[in-house]
Amino acid sequence: MKIVISNHSELPIYAQVKEQIKEQIMTGVILEGTKLPSIRQLAKDLKISVITITRAYSELESEGYIATMQGKGSVVLGRDNDLLREQYLRRIEEALETAIETARFLKLSNEELIDMLGNLIDDE
């Protein structure tokens, strides 16, 4: 697991940690069942506060990416998890909204946009 903290980022440090772990889970870099480093170990490795990592892990847990068990640590949940599925669906919706906005800007018809989507699906 690779996490890079930037002092120039607009995001607070806990959010940088959270977003990078979340992205690695969603892209399959960190697999289901993988045990994450302990809060203390990750804080030490990144040279940041334990409180910062605690907040990042807490938010990852509330969003359904990880489960934390007292005394056992935090583990990445499966992609079939309902909360994680909702995150993926939201990401798809955002991408489609961007495509629709761009199509409207170019004055494409709904049929042209749907044809483009169909072609992309067929190419798979």
Image (tube, helix red, strand yellow):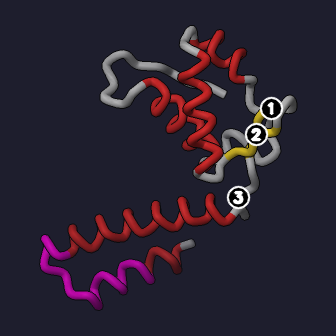
Instruction: Find out whether the residues at labels 1 and 2 contact each other: C-beta distance under 8 Å.
Output: yes
Residue that badge 1 annotates: 73
The correct choice, above or below, for 26 with respect to 105 in the image is above
At a point 46% along the width and 33% down the height, the residue shown is 15
Q: Which residue is painted at 62% across and 15% down in the image?
A: 43
Read off the magenta span: 104-118
- Which circle marks residue 17 in the picture? none
The rendered magenta stretch, by its main secondary structure, is classed as helix
Looking at the picture, how far across and down is residue 86, in whole percent? 56, 65
Residue drawn 74% across and 25% down?
A: 37
Residue 71: percent from left, percent from top = 86, 29
Q: Residues within 10 Å of mark 1 (few under 14, many from 20)?
A: few
Q: Which residue is mark 3?
A: 79
Residue type of the residue flagged with mark 3: Arg
Compared to 74, does 84 lie above or below? below
Q: Which residue is mark 2?
A: 68
